[in-house]
Amino acid sequence: MKEAMLYSKEGGKVRCILCPHNCLISEGKRGICMVRENNFGVLNSLVYGVLSAAHIDPIEKKPLFHYKPGSNSYSIATVGCNLRCEFCQNWDLSQGPKTGKVSGKKISPKEVVEQALENDCESISFTYSEPTIFLEFAKDVGELARSEGLGNVFVSNGFMSKEAFDETESFLDAANIDIKSFSEGFYEKYCGGRLKPVLDTCKRMVERGVWLEVTTLIIPGLNDSEKELSQIASFICDELGDGVPWHVSRFHPDYKLTDIPPTPMESILRAVELGRDAGLKFVYSGNTPYGEYENTNCPKCGLTLVERVGYSIYKKDISSGTCPECSTRIEGFF
């Protein structure tokens, strides 16, 4: 247990300002994330250094296709999340603390960085659950990792406060953020959150110079209309930049949405077309058998610069960050 960052005292209660919920927490109670607790007027993080997952992943699994492609990332998580997505594919981690129990293995920031270095990882990813809710640990790990030459990655729902985002300035290099829908109603009903703070976080990432990629899980009948997908693509292109990659991912039934079928392949391919029509240079499909939509191609001459099959890379001709055929600059960190 460690005293949390970003809270204020209001009588015997505490106000957490880590995310836009701004939970007002009574003595002995926890916030919506279920891992920040008021103990006699002090807000404590219950998951500092308590990891529920630690794996060596290809960076492509995040997914990040334009940040150190072909490298491994030491990926860690605690339990807990500040959203309640009914389609969560890691619900056992994200929703685990709802029972009141916080489980995991104790570890120090130094040990995390040592394990990343020992396993030839080029970065540390804070992933699987929502890294915002274990920001104290992520910051301590991230600052130490950066001093050792490692990159730091957030795989996030983007539902964080400006104050929380500002705390990442000392260590965060790249992020993949979910834009789950372009509807406030969807976020309220299926996620227990709001859309606007997510869009604001995306814009802050780009303004700060954090490398950003965006993922949308396409769920049949809920967020798969051409209008909504075009709105997401246009937001990315117009507000974040046409070089920001968009990953459109195939839904499979999970958690509380087991009655909805997997996303039809034609919906994924149509989303790719809509993204390109909006002006995006790089649109990728996820959870599909269409390998050609995982490749990175030069937006000018069409040369395949990175050829992918699943999480494996079979060709990489982009080390300089430019196309070797026509010298076009490719956005990202290669």
Image (cartoon, rainbow, N blue to C red):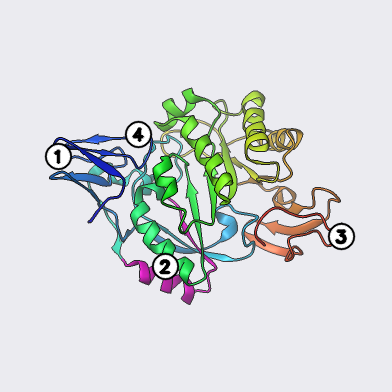
Which of disc 2 and disc 3 is earlier in sequence? 2
In this rendering, is residue 204 above or below 46?
above
Q: Viewer-nearest of labels 2 and 4?
A: 2
Residue 4 x, y percent position in the rendering: 27, 50
Q: Viewer-nearest of labels 3 and 2?
A: 2
C-alpha distance separating marks 4 and 1: 18 Å
Question: Disc 2 marks which residue?
Answer: 144
Q: Assess whether mark 3 and mark 1 are in contact (beta carbons under 8 angstroms).
A: no
Q: Amino acid at mark 2?
A: Leu
Which of disc 1 and disc 4 is earlier in sequence? 4
Q: Amino acid at mark 1?
A: Glu
Which of disc 4 and disc 2 is earlier in sequence? 4
Tell me the residue at 42%/74% (across/down).
Answer: 114
Q: Secondary structure at mark 1?
A: loop
The quarter holding residue 274 reads top right
The quarter holding residue 216 reads top right
Question: Disc 1 marks which residue?
Answer: 27
Circle 4 packing at 10 Å, graded few (<14), some (14-19), many (20+), is: many
Tell me the residue at 30%/59% (across/down).
Answer: 104
Q: Amino acid at mark 4?
A: His
Asked if residue 62 lies left or right of residue 326, the reply is: left
Tell me the residue at 45%/63% (across/down).
Answer: 55
C-alpha distance separating marks 2 and 4: 29 Å
Q: Assess whether mark 3 and mark 4 are in contact (beta carbons under 8 angstroms).
A: no
Q: Quadrant of the N terminus?
A: bottom left
Residue 140 x, y percent position in the rendering: 37, 62
Question: Disc 4 marks which residue?
Answer: 21
Q: Quadrant of the C terminus?
A: bottom right
Circle 1 packing at 10 Å, graded few (<14), some (14-19), many (20+), is: some
State the extent of the magenta-drawn residues as a range: 107-128
The quarter holding residue 22 reads top left
